[in-house]
Amino acid sequence: MTDKKQMRSAARLYAVQALFQMEVSGQTVEGVVAEFETHRFGEVFEEVEMAEGDVGHFRSVIDGAVNWQAKIDQMTDRALVAKWPIDRIDPVLRALFRAAGAELVGMPTPPKVAINEYVDVAKAFFPEGKEAKFVNAVLDHMAREAQPAAF
């Protein structure tokens, strides 16, 4: 994997973390973005150095997730089973769907790339669970709605 690809992958992981943090803490976008760019990118955590993220990509994902949140949440709701609206799912998954939705709705990321990248993010957060398959199915549905010509 090239450095640029690695940095984008790291930016996606950080974006999900930042969106989660914003939701649970009530912090502002500006505050969370500044914290991540200043302290989280390249942080040493439990003797493991975190990857540097692509700052531009990180900001674009956060920006898109915040600006397109209503549209993304509606797309996510349509992709979920009727008994599980977006407000009932795990907040980490909600943040992940919003970050991925930002790339599907407002960025030039090819849908298959976005799906694969965010399935990998799901595996990072839920290494033992079935969440990755769930994420794959939901994002596939969202991608087909957002970019039908790509399929």
Image: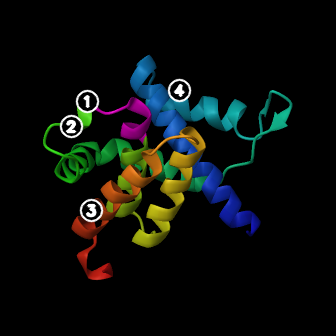
**Residue at position x 53%, y 29% from top?**
32
Q: Is residue 9 magenta?
A: no
Of marks 4 and 3, which one's residue comes earlier in the chain?
4
* Residue 85 position in % (x across, y down): 19, 37
Residue placed under numbered mark 3 in the picture: 141
Of marks 4 and 1, which one's residue comes earlier in the chain?
4
Of marks 2 and 4, which one's residue comes earlier in the chain?
4
Quote the CA–CA distance across marks 3 and 2: 15 Å
Q: Are marks 3 and 1 in contact (CB under 8 Å)?
A: no
Q: Nearer the viewer, mark 2 or mark 4?
A: 2
Q: Are marks 2 and 1 in contact (CB under 8 Å)?
A: yes
Quote the CA–CA distance across marks 2 and 4: 31 Å
Residue placed under numbered mark 4 in the picture: 31
Of marks 3 and 1, which one's residue comes earlier in the chain?
1
* Residue 75 position in % (x across, y down): 21, 53
Q: Is residue 92 magenta?
A: yes
Quote the CA–CA distance across marks 4 and 1: 26 Å
* Residue 26 position in % (x across, y down): 40, 19
Local crowd size for mark 4, using a 10 Å CA cut-off: few (<14), some (14–19), many (≥20): few
Residue placed under numbered mark 1 in the picture: 88
- Of the residues shown, which amino acid type is indicated by label 1? Arg
